[in-house]
Image (cartoon, helix red, strand yellow):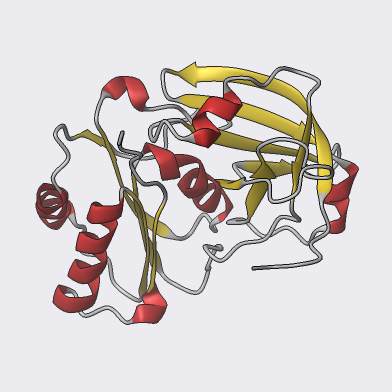
Amino acid sequence: METNIEIQKGQLIEIKQLNRHVFHLKIQSEDFDKMQYVPGFTLDIYLGNGEILSNLETRKYSIWNYEPVHQIIDVAICTFSNGKGAHWVSTLKNGDILYFNPPKGKLLINESADYYYLIGDITSLSHLYEINRNLSINKKVFSFIYAYSQRDIFPDIDGSFPFDYYVINPLIPELVQQKIEALEPDFSGTGFAYILGEPKTVITLHDYFKNQKKWNSNQLRSKPFWKEIKDI
């Protein structure tokens, strides 16, 4: 466990519900000026006052956009899991002070490839939007966003819908793989894939890229973005 982490804070200047499962937060903080921002950073937000409550839980959210002039970060918080983070976000209001650890990340933008696969569900959509917006315009992109319902899809921060979306309900990882195989373009050069979202689908697709497409591990960034909280 990390110790002696500098706890930062900022003001929630806007919160709105985009659809039945997604909240959009805009957080302003002078502390953001300290970071060397890289697209793909995440923000560990405390579910309460992190300065006075010891052992307070955090939740990790992707930075959807960073506006450095006014030091504003956007995040999209999905509530599919119905866990503590989902209940916490429903209590927030404009003007609230939020506490968080300094932004950082591992699923960062990689501009070394010739083309990209951006694959994920709604929980990873804001992360993929941010990666996509910051790739050079000469990069080719194959996108595959899977959703249980059309109602769950929301636009990028600029109002655009740059990705291809597929409603798959019930979600079956093997079916997602089959659809991707059928749609894959014939890109040339070196590829790089971000495979994010629902855990079982992430594992299935990671194995597909590694074992069938014979991609190296350094061409893949895969991570489950949530897990279902089951009633006991």
Residue 212 visible in this rendered orientation of the protein: yes
70 and 114: which is toward the camera: 70
Q: Where is residue 73 in the image (x, y as percent from the top left)?
A: 71, 39
Residue at the location (13% across, 57% down)? 181
Q: Is residue 175 left or right of residue 160?
A: left
As drawn, the residue found furthest toward the right would be 30
Residue at the location (75% across, 67% down)? 3
Q: Position of residue 110 (x, y in %)?
A: 52, 68
Label tally: 0
68 and 3: which is toward the camera: 3
90 and 31: which is toward the camera: 90
Q: In this view, does 213 lie to the left or right of 142?
A: left
As drawn, the residue found furthest toward the front would be 232
Residue at the location (61% across, 62% down)? 105
In the picture, the quarter occupied by the C terminus is top left
Q: In this view, does 201 lie to the left or right of 131?
A: left
Q: Where is residue 157 in the image (x, y as percent from the top left)?
A: 57, 32
159 over 106 or under it: above or below? above
Residue 77 visible in this rendered orientation of the protein: no
Residue at the location (18% across, 74% down)? 213
61 over 11 or under it: above or below? below
In the picture, the quarter occupied by the N terminus is bottom right
Q: Splitting the image into 4 quarters, where does residue 125 fall?
A: top left
Q: Where is residue 142 in the image (x, y as percent from the top left)?
A: 31, 53
